[in-house]
Amino acid sequence: MIEVLQKTDEKVLAFKVSEKLTAEDYENVLMPKIDERIKHGGKVRLLLEWGEDFEGWKTKAIIDDAKLCFAHWNHFERWALVGAPKWVGISAKLFDKLSKGKVKLFEAGEIDQAFAWASA
């Protein structure tokens, strides 16, 4: 499940991911918000908070995740990842090295620090 957090503002799109992510989560929540932000501002600053009940991705959601990243490779300006599983952090560091955007990992509970960094 992907839900929009109240912290979302004109600079940062903030989401919480929990349970098992589905294609519908990407197609109905995440991608429309990102596409709208790109249409109006060109760049995306993203905050993703992982819930303790996060279980991973269904197969189609993995494909949607990859499509999203590659389609908007140069649109992501900052990604703040809060409480991400270790393996997500490793792939995020690779994205940080290869893309123009910046990625920073935060511990669970550091959402305010993550939001401040993403907003800066």
Image: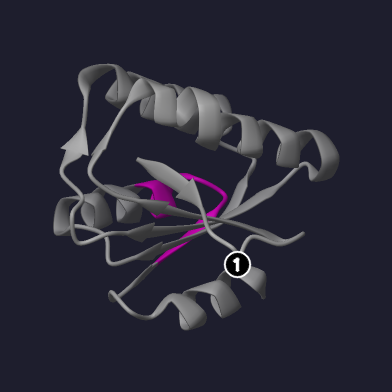
Along the line of sight, which residue is nearer the eye, 94 or 6? Answer: 6
Determine whether the residue tagged by mark 1 lies in a helix, strand or loop.
loop
Q: Quadrant of the C terminus?
A: bottom right
Image side of residue 79 versus residue 87, left or right? right
Residue 95 versus residue 107 in the image, above or below = above
* Residue 60 seen by the camera: yes
Along the line of sight, which residue is nearer the eye, 109 or 90? Answer: 109
Which residue lies most toward the right here?
A: 40
Q: Quadrant of the N terminus?
A: top left
Q: Which residue is mark 1?
A: 7
Q: Where residue 3 sits: x, y (%)?
A: 46, 47
Along the line of sight, which residue is nearer the eye, 100 or 57? Answer: 57
Image side of residue 41 versus residue 114, left or right? right
Q: Where residue 19 sits: x, y (%)?
A: 23, 44
* Residue 70 seen by the camera: no
Q: Which residues are magenta?
A: 95-104
- The residue at 42%/31% (across/down) is 25
82 is within the stretch colored magenta: no
Amino acid found under the numbered disc labelled 1? Lys
Residue 112 versus residue 64 in the image, above or below = below
- The residue at 29%/26% (across/down) is 62
Q: Where residue 118 sits: x, y (%)?
A: 58, 68
Q: Where residue 106 sits: x, y (%)?
A: 35, 74
- The residue at 59%/63% (across/down) is 6
Along the line of sight, which residue is nearer the eye, 74 or 120? Answer: 120
Residue 36 lies in quadrant: top right
Residue 34 lies in quadrant: top right
